[in-house]
Structure formats: structure tokens, C-alpha cells
Image: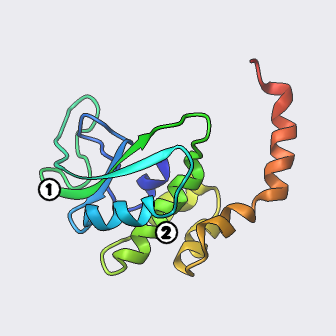
Amino acid sequence: MCLIEGTNLSEGRGTERPFEMIGAPFVRGEVLARQLNDAHLPGVVFDPIEFTPKSDPRSAPRPKHMDQVCGGVLIRVVERDSFEPVRTGIYVLSAVRRLFPDDFKWRIGGIDRLAGTKELRQSIDAGVHPDKIVEAWGDQLGEFKKLRMRYLLY
């Protein structure tokens, strides 16, 4: 869910569950949860929530939307083995971009750096379906998986 850091959405820093909840003052949690749950993503369920990020000098000195009530979703992983975190992150970004287009913003340098390319941002902005975005990585992902095998310890 670190892709959320490349946007104006709170990734839950300054709460008791960072990276498990995302949102912003402009997000309607019920609407976002329904949209994401209707996608039937493997291993994950989205619950509508409200949260207020607070400053914590050790972990979140200036969290996004500090002291503001944020609507959003709690991301509950219910089946770890089938959960696909990157696909889920892309679905979340696509849904928020589509549902709240006037308020959602990219942190251009941030999202492109986190994603490793500007293609993710451009694809979401163009309305490309999240599954098509992930499918486009097919050949490269297969090559990466082969390469990484020699580095896996377990």
C-alpha cells in the first residue's frame, strides 16, 4: 500500500493502523468500500471507516490531513496466501481517482518514483482497468521471478 504515499490520500500514518487504513477528508468511505468490495479482490475486504491522523514525533510528525476527519477504508487481509498487495493498491488508486476526480491528486515525483515509472499514473489517469495494468507486466514479471530465484533464501 506504499503507492498511497504518492498521492494526497492519507496512508494512515498518525493512526493506530498505518497502511491498513487509507482515506482523506474528501473520501466517502461507504462508497469507496462498496466499489472495492464489488471488485472481489482475492484475500481482502474493505470496511468503511473514519479516522483522524494525529502527530506522533517518533513515527508521524506531520501526517497528511493531520487533525482532520478522513473518510476511507480499513483494508482487512482475510486470506494472506491469496492477497495481492500491488494489484490491490492499483485498484484502490483507480477507484479513488474515478470516484473523487476533483479532489484526488498525485504527488507526481512521488508516485512515479514509487511505481518506478510514470506509466502507472498515466494508465490510471487514462481510465485503464487495473487488471489491464497488471496484465501488461506479464512478461517482465516472469523474467523478474526467474532472476530473483537465485537470491531467495527460503
In the image, residue 33 sits, relative to residue 46, either above or below, namely below
Looking at the picture, tell me which residue is in the foreground, 116 or 136.
Answer: 136
Relative horizontal placement of residue 150, taking residue 112 as reference (left or right): right
Q: Which mark is residue 69?
A: 1
Q: Which mark is residue 40?
A: none
- What amino acid type is highlighted by mark number 1? Val
Across and down, in percent, residue 6 comes to 45, 58
Across and down, in percent, residue 44 comes to 48, 46
- What amino acid type is highlighted by mark number 2? Ser
Q: Residue at x 51, y 54 (%)?
A: 89
> Extreme top residue here?
154
Across and down, in percent, residue 48 comes to 27, 55
In the image, residue 97 sits, relative to residue 78, either above or below, namely below
Q: Residue 97 is drawn in which quadrant?
A: bottom left
Q: What residue is disc 2 on?
A: 94
Tell me how far mark 1 sits from mark 2, CA to CA.
22 Å
Q: Residue at x 53, y 36 (%)?
A: 79
Q: Residue at x 82, y 54 (%)?
A: 140
Mark nearer the N terminus (1 vs 2):
1
